Image (tube, rainbow, N blue to C red):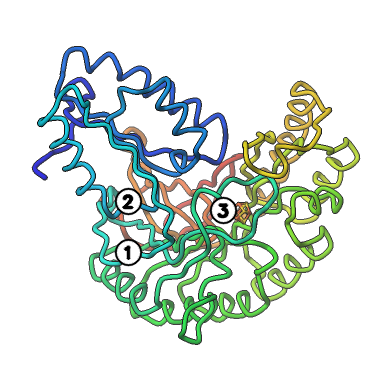
């Protein structure tokens, strides 16, 4: 439409906020930032402020925008993203034709469709994200995603394979397949396909590249998945498998449909097939009704699995989810203390895991260069960062390195 990018919001004629509904904190941050740019409208009357993303799929948010953020010109959700140019054009026309009418445009569409040939601008020329499915059917009791992103729907494998092939042809070396629950990929498609079968197809191209994927729901992480990874040439030896909690009572309340024992069984099977597999996970601390004893089940699980790293969160209620209605007697103060305890345990686990890797020879992808130290930042198949002395022109190459030292968050190595 003739617009170009600017680094300076004061020069902008259009400011578009892409939002996330997962945590309340992210929503508050979005509103804070939007409130700040309101002032820019005073000096630039042609400025359009646009809000999109899954936060806007909630009626309560639309009501809040209408009452307090009426200066936003266009609001649309994830279901309408492919129509953004159309809605933006209409907003411009409305504003030009009748300034008093304001041109406000609040779009609410709920149809669960898949749009192919969607143009993508990628900021990195080595690493790419490739969506393979959208939506979620799991309805974990704390999660807003199924309400804002709609039901699960998978892209046809032919479309994914063709896009994947183009990425390889364009020099991408590290491609992450995306979906709320990639392990249920293929359900509802006419073709006979599931996630392991898709991975197998994507693994079959020539050349050096890495396939990653996220996120995996443990209830759908099958033996077939790990069998395929173990026999593959390109699939990363890393799985992000969010466990959320180690207490069976809380897992049931969360509607996660697995137990601590069944989760550990998956981990054991994966380790038996792929001895160097790296696990990472998400943990929610302080779910309503969680006791300290429940929390200790989680720390016990961490010690058993030995995750390389974790995304940890204090439970945040999301309006409209079943968990938001549960009584939550534990104070924020207490939950914070539990979280700190958990982080300390995890820090030790990560540190030890990294230490155990000293002396190993690994293939890594050189991703970027630090001129101050003449170091390359590289990534292992297990998604761990390795710093090695090297030249900038190694960026984009797979290198063999010997791990010589370790830190809490990363490794040190040398090219061999
Ligand atoms: S599987 Fe993930 S996205 Fe789906 S409801 Fe559960 S937490 Fe939310």
x and y, in percent, of residue 183 in the image: 58, 69
Determine which residue is flagged by label 2.
81
SS at badge 1: loop
Q: Marks 2/1: CA distance?
A: 9 Å
Q: Which residue is drawn at 39% across and 46% down?
A: 108
Which disc number belongs to residue 135?
none
- Specify the quarter for ligand 1: bottom right
- Res 43 → quadrant: top left
Camera-nearest residue between 83 and 232: 83
Are discs 2 and 1 less than 8 Å apart at CB?
yes
Name which quarter of the figure residue 90 lies in: top left
* Label 3: element kind: helix
Whether label 3 touches label 1, CB < 8 Å: no
Quadrant location of the N terminus?
A: top left
First along the sequence among labels 2 and 1: 2
Mark seen at residue 115: 1
Residue drawn at point x = 73 percent, y = 29 percent: 340
- Secondary structure beneath dot 2 equals helix
Q: Do the residues labelled 3 and 2 touch (CB within 8 Å)?
A: no
Q: Which callout, 3 or 2, points at the residue further toward the start of the chain?
A: 2
Residue at mark 3: C-beta within 8 A of ligand 1: yes
Residue at x-position 62% and y-position 59%? 278
Q: Decide which of tag 3 and tag 1 comes sooner along the chain.
A: 1
Q: Residue at x 80, y 65 (%)?
A: 262
For mark 3, what is the residue? Answer: 146
Ligand 1 has an atom within 8 Å of the beta carbon of the residue at disc 1: no
Residue closest to the eye, 114 or 344: 114
Q: Is residue 253 above or below residue 28?
A: below
Residue 206 lies, in percent from the top left, at 34, 80
Q: Which of 341 and 277 is in front in this view?
A: 341
Left or right: where 299 falls relative to 228: right
């Amino acid at each position: 439409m003739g617009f170009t990018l600017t680094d300076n919001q004061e020069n902008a004629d259009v400011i578009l906020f892409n939002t996330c509904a997962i945590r309340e904190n992210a929503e508050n941050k979005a509103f804070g930032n939007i409130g700040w740019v309101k002032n820019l409208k005073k000096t630039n009357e042609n400025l359009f402020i646009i809000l999109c993303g899954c936060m806007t799929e909630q009626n309560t948010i639309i009501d809040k925008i209408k009452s307090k953020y009426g200066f936003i010109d266009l609001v649309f959700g994830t279901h309408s993203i492919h129509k953004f140019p159309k809605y933006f054009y209409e907003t411009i026309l409305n504003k030009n034709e009748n300034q008093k009418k304001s041109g406000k445009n609040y779009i609410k569409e709920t149809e669960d469709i898949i749009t192919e040939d969607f143009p993508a601008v990628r900021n990195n020329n080595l690493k790419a994200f490739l969506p393979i499915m959208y939506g979620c059917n799991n309805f974990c009791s704390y999660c807003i995603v199924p309400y804002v992103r709609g039901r699960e729907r998978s892209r046809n494998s032919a479309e994914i394979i063709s896009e994947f092939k183009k990425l390889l042809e364009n020099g991408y070396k590290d491609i992450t397949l995306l979906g709320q629950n990639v392990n249920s990929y293929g359900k509802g498609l006419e073709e006979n396909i599931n996630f392991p079968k898709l991975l197998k197809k994507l693994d079959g191209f020539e050349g050096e590249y890495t396939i990653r994927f996220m996120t995996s729901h443990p209830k759908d992480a099958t033996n077939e998945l790990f069998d395929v990874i173990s026999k593959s040439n390109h699939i990363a030896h890393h799985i992000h498998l969010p466990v959320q909690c180690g207490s069976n009572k809380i897992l049931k309340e969360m509607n996660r449909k697995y137990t601590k024992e069944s989760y550990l069984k998956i981990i054991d099977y994966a380790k038996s097939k792929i001895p160097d597999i790296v696990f990472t996970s998400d943990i929610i601390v302080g779910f309503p009704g969680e006791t300290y004893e429940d929390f200790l089940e989680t720390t016990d699980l961490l010690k058993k699995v030995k995750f390389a790293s974790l995304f940890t969160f204090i439970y945040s209620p999301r309006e409209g989810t079943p968990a938001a209605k549960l009584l939550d007697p534990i104070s924020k103060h207490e939950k914070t203390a539990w979280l700190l305890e958990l982080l300390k345990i995890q820090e030790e686990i990560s540190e030890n895991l990294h230490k155990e890797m000293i002396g190993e020879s690994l293939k890594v992808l050189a991703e970027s260069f630090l001129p101050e130290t003449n170091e390359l930042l590289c990534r292992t198949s297990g998604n761990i960062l390795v710093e090695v002395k090297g030249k900038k022109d190694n960026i984009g190459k797979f290198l063999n390195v010997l791990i010589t030292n370790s830190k809490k968050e990363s490794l040190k190595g040398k090219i061999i």
